[in-house]
Amino acid sequence: MIWLAVLNTFVNAYRQTYPVVKKIGTVTEQPNTEIPANLTVPSGNCYKFLLYGCGDQIYQCVISGSSSQWSTVGPDAYLVNNKKDPFTSKYEVGHHYWQKTPVNGGRITWQSIVKGDNSSVIAKLIAQSASPDGPQNIPWLITQSTSNQGEGAFEDITYVLRINPKGGIAPPATQCGTTYKNGTLYRSHYTTEYWFYTASK
């Protein structure tokens, strides 16, 4: 996936050129959304802010012998503070992707692209719950931080929830090896909310 890493570097460099947003995380009041019990954030942590995400979930068709499946490569999505903000370089405040090499067991990454904030959080999956809006949507998730880097909005994040995702699922397994050749990358568009938590003071 060298090409993907190079592309991410180029896109991030471009997007950081013309920022107008100075702060990450302006929605600091937790929404009144019912959270599945298995996604409950442990006591000792509190809601910090949410960000809205838009991008792609990337899958790869993998054929091994007589079996075929879609393997998750990871997300390529950008984050904004407010639901009405356009997903353009002037409003995007973060990039969401997977690390190539796990860090303390985590790969799931949210990274600031705001000037003056070089923070990021890397997390691992703890649990997931099927979307209440139907199987055409990727599941809701809870992830736990395995590494915090830099200084800024993500430096003290302990847990991240993926809430209300729309879209993002892989094609049917039967299409891997038929409609799509072995090794094909498929990008599935999705939107979601990411809720960020920090340790209680």
Image (cartoon, rainbow, N blue to C red):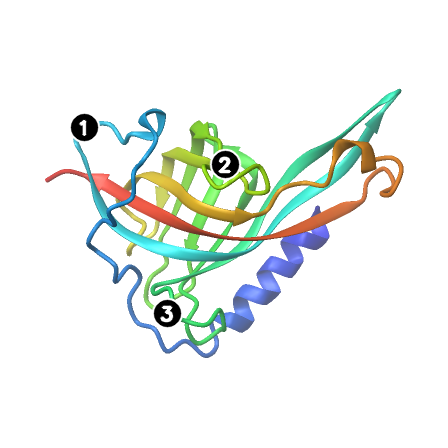
Q: Name the residue under label 3.
A: 115
Where is residue 163, by image quadrant? top left
Q: Does 27 appear above or below 92?
A: above
- How packed mark 1 is, by other alpha carbons closer than 10 Å (few <14, some 14-19, many 20 or more), is few
Q: How many marks?
A: 3
Q: Which label sits on residue 43?
A: 1
Q: Does 4 appear above or below 98?
A: below
Which element carries disc 2, helix, strand or loop? loop
Q: Mark 2 points at which residue?
A: 139
Res. 104 in view: no
Rendering coords of residue 182 (x, y %): 85, 37
Residue at the far top: name it: 66
Q: Are marks 3 and 1 in contact (CB under 8 Å)?
A: no
Instruction: Please name whichever residue, 162 or 134, is drawn nearer the observer in this view of the structure.
Output: 134
Label 3, label 2: how far apart the Cα atoms are = 32 Å
Where is residue 74, by image quadrant? top right
Q: Does 86 appear above or below 167?
A: below
Q: Which amino acid does label 2 sit on?
A: Pro
- How packed mark 3 is, by other alpha carbons closer than 10 Å (few <14, some 14-19, many 20 or more), is some
Q: Which amino acid does label 1 sit on?
A: Ser
Viewer-nearest of labels 3 and 2?
Answer: 2
